[in-house]
Image (tube, rainbow, N blue to C red):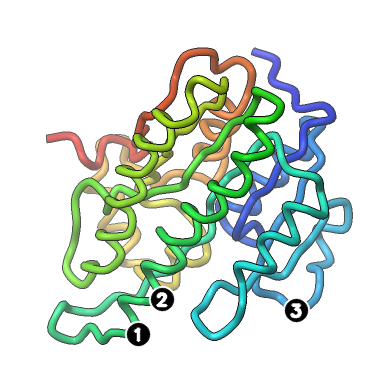
C-alpha cells in the first residue's frame, strides 16, 4: 500500500522524541510538510528539514496564543497529530492539585483546544485528519495513574464527539492508544528488569516499536482511510485482551 502525503501540511505536537519524533519523520519521508512542537527553546539539530515551534503547555504562560500563532503561520494544517503528553506516577493519596492540573491540561485540554482551532481551517477545505494519541491506560489502569488515566480516557471520549461534529465536513478523527513502547521514556520508568517483566505479560512477547505506532497513525491520517472515524484503536500487542 503506497501512502503519500505530498504537499500535505502536518502538525505533530510533542514531536521531538519517542513516538512523536518517529511519526514526524515518517510523515516527512512520505512527502509531507511537517511542523513539530516541543518544549526545547532551540530547534533540535535532527529536525533541520522540519518547521519547529516551541510550545510549552502549562498554566503559567499564554500557550493558547502561541498555538494560534503556529496555526496561523502555516495557514492551517491538513493533518493534526495530538501527541504531546505528560505523566507523573503517584498514588492517589500522594497526588497534588498541580499534578492533576498539569496532566489534564497537557493531555486533554490542549488537544481539544488545538483541534478546535485546526478544524476550522479543515472545514473550509472540506478535508482533514486528526489523530489523538491515547494510551492503554485510558482503557485499563495501573497503580499511581489516576490523573493520567482520567486524561487518556477523556481523550478517547472527546474523539467520538469530535468525529460526530466534523464528519459532515469530510474530517476524520480517531485515537491510537499504544501499549508499552520501547522508548527512552519507557526504559527510564520501567528499567531493564521491568521491561522484561512487561514483555511476559504481552501476548506478542515484545514491546511495541515506535514504527508499530507510527505506521498505524499514518494509515489513519491518509486518504487510504476512507471510512474509519470516531474510533479508539489499541496497539498493545494484546496486553488488554481479557
Q: Quadrant of residue 157?
A: top left
Q: Describe the element under mark 3 as helix, strand or loop.
A: loop
- Callout 1 crowding tier (Cα within 10 Å): few <14, some 14–19, many ≥20: few
* Left or right: 196 in relation to 66: left
Residue at 71% across / 26% down in the picture? 125
Task: Give the class, few, some or many, for how many residues have Cα within 10 Å of label 3's Cα (few <14, many ≥20).
Answer: few
Foreground pick, 74 / 92: 74
Q: Quadrant of the N terminus?
A: top right
- The image position of residue 186, as x and y in percent, is 43, 63
**Discs 1, 3 touching: Cβ within 8 Å:** no
Taking 23 as reference, is 125 above or below it? above
Q: Could you say whether the residue bearing mark 2 is in a helix, strand or loop?
A: helix
Question: Which element is circle 1 on?
Answer: helix
Residue 52 drawn at (x, y percent): 79, 61
Whole-percent x, y for residue 122 in the image: 65, 33
Nearer to us: label 1 or label 3: 1
The nearer-to-camera label among 3 and 2 is 2
Residue at mark 2 to residue at mark 1: CA–CA distance: 6 Å
Indicate whether 177 appears above or below 87.
above
User: Which image quarter is the C terminus in?
Assistant: top left
Write down the residue under mark 3.
41
The answer to which of 51 and 23 lies nearer the viewer is 51
Q: Would you say 119 lies left or right of 209 here? A: right
Residue matched to label 1: 98
Residue beneath disc 2: 102
- Inter-mark Cα distance, 1 to 3: 23 Å
Looking at the picture, does residue 149 appear above or below residue 105?
above
Amino acid at each position: 500500500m503506497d501512502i503519500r502525503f505530498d504537499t500535505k501540511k502536518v502538525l505533530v505536537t510533542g514531536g521531538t522524541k519517542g513516538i512523536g519524533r518517529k511519526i514526524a519523520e515518517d510523515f516527512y519521508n512520505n512527502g509531507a510538510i511537517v511542523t513539530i512542537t516541543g518544549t526545547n527553546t532551540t530547534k533540535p539539530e535532527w529536525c533541520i528539514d522540519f518547521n519547529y515551534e516551541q510550545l510549552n503547555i502549562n498554566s503559567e504562560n499564554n500557550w493558547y496564543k502561541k498555538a494560534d500563532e503556529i496555526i496561523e503561520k502555516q495557514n492551517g494544517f491538513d493533518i493534526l497529530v495530538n501527541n504531546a503528553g505528560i505523566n507523573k506516577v503517584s498514588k492517589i493519596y500522594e497526588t497534588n492539585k498541580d499534578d492533576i492540573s498539569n496532566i489534564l491540561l497537557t493531555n486533554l485540554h490542549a488537544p481539544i483546544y488545538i483541534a478546535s482551532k485546526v478544524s476550522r481551517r479543515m472545514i473550509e477545505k472540506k478535508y482533514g485528519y486528526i489523530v489523538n494519541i491515547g494510551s492503554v491506560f485510558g482503557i485499563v489502569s495501573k497503580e499511581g495513574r489516576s490523573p493520567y488515566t482520567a486524561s487518556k480516557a477523556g481523550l478517547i471520549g472527546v474523539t467520538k464527539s469530535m468525529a460526530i461534529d466534523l464528519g459532515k465536513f469530510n474530517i476524520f478523527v480517531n485515537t491510537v492508544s499504544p501499549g508499552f513502547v520501547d522508548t527512552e521514556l519507557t526504559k527510564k520508568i520501567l528499567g531493564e528488569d521491568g521491561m522484561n517483566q512487561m514483555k511476559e505479560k504481552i501476548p506478542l512477547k515484545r514491546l511495541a516499536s515506535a514504527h508499530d505506532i507510527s505506521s498505524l497513525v499514518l494509515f489513519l491520517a491518509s486518504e487510504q482511510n476512507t471510512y474509519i472515524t470516531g474510533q479508539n484503536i489499541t496497539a498493545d500487542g494484546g496486553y488488554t485482551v481479557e
